[in-house]
Amino acid sequence: MATRTIDLVNLVPARGLAGRDAPSDEIINACVRCGFCLNSCPTFLETGIETSSPRGRIYLMKAVAEGRLAPDSPGFAGQMYECLGCLACEAVCPSGVQYGKILEPARDQVERRIRRPLGQRLVRAASFKVLFADMRLFRLQSGLFRAYQRSGAQWLARRSGALRALGLDRAEGFLPRMSGRFFVPRGRSTRRRGRGGRGWRSSPAAS
Ligand code: SF4
Ligand code: SF4
């Protein structure tokens, strides 16, 4: 009879941190709450709210680590994603708090607990597991977006109201202007993982 092994470390408890890659207590506790980072943090400067600051976010992580706050609480999840990840706070921290090393693990704690709507899950899976995993697909997509922007299709889609009718107007507004050099570094090559490790060489960039 087959036996199932249970990964106790990665079990998701109701509270507290889970998993081998949970934010490090050592880094969290290195914050002495001096506040030197506050004026470097764009989200704090914009909101003036303590929990929107590096110090506040580290405190929230500490509260989650100690089981005083649920990782899927809106306050924690919202702040982990409101953070821009710019690491301006890390550069000025006199205690050397390695904020960048706890931010992504903290976001992972959120993702372990929340269940996103089906549409979001599909888009995230397609993006992270398919598109970003294959540079050829990513470049193909970039080329299609570029053609959309330069062929007049974007102008037409916006003017006709089609984007609004499809509920895509807001998302489409985030699309950056695609340049011919987008992710096509001139004269550089890279090697894809898997599939025998066959490499590809980037083509000369078009302007
Ligand atoms: S500067 Fe560093 S030690 Fe001071 S509050 Fe900010 S993160 Fe904490
Ligand atoms: S990474 Fe940037 S946005 Fe996030 S807490 Fe640090 S300074 Fe603020």
Image (cartoon, helix red, strand yellow):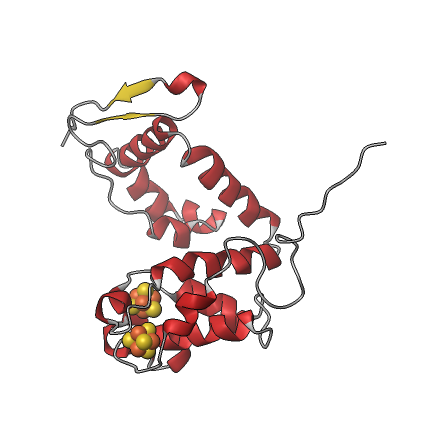
In the displayed structure, does residue 94 sit left or right of residue 103?
left
Q: Position of residue 176 (x, y in %)?
A: 28, 47
> Which residue shows up at 40% across the image and 26% down it?
193
Instruction: In the rendered view, tell whether residue 24 sits above or below residue 127.
Output: below
The answer to whether residue 101 is left or right of residue 4 is left
Give the quadrant of the N terminus.
top right
Q: Give the residue furthest to the front.
A: 26
Of the four image quadrants, the one with ligand 2 is: bottom left
* In this picture, residue 90 sits left or right of residue 5: left
Q: Vertically, is 148 above or below 34?
A: above
* Residue 94 appears anywhere in the view: yes
The one nearer the camera, 60 or 130, is: 60
Residue in the foreground of this view, choosing between 113 and 43: 113
28 is higher (above) or lower (below) than 190: below
At which x and y percent is residue 150? 23, 36
| Residue occupying image coordinates x 50% and y 54% | 21
Residue at image coords 24%, 40% = 178
Q: Residue at x 22, y 71 (%)?
A: 92
Residue 11: which quarter of the image? Answer: bottom right
Q: Nearer the viewer, residue 107 or 21?
A: 21
Q: Outermost residue, right direction? A: 1
Query: Of 55 and 176, which appears nearest the observer?
Result: 55
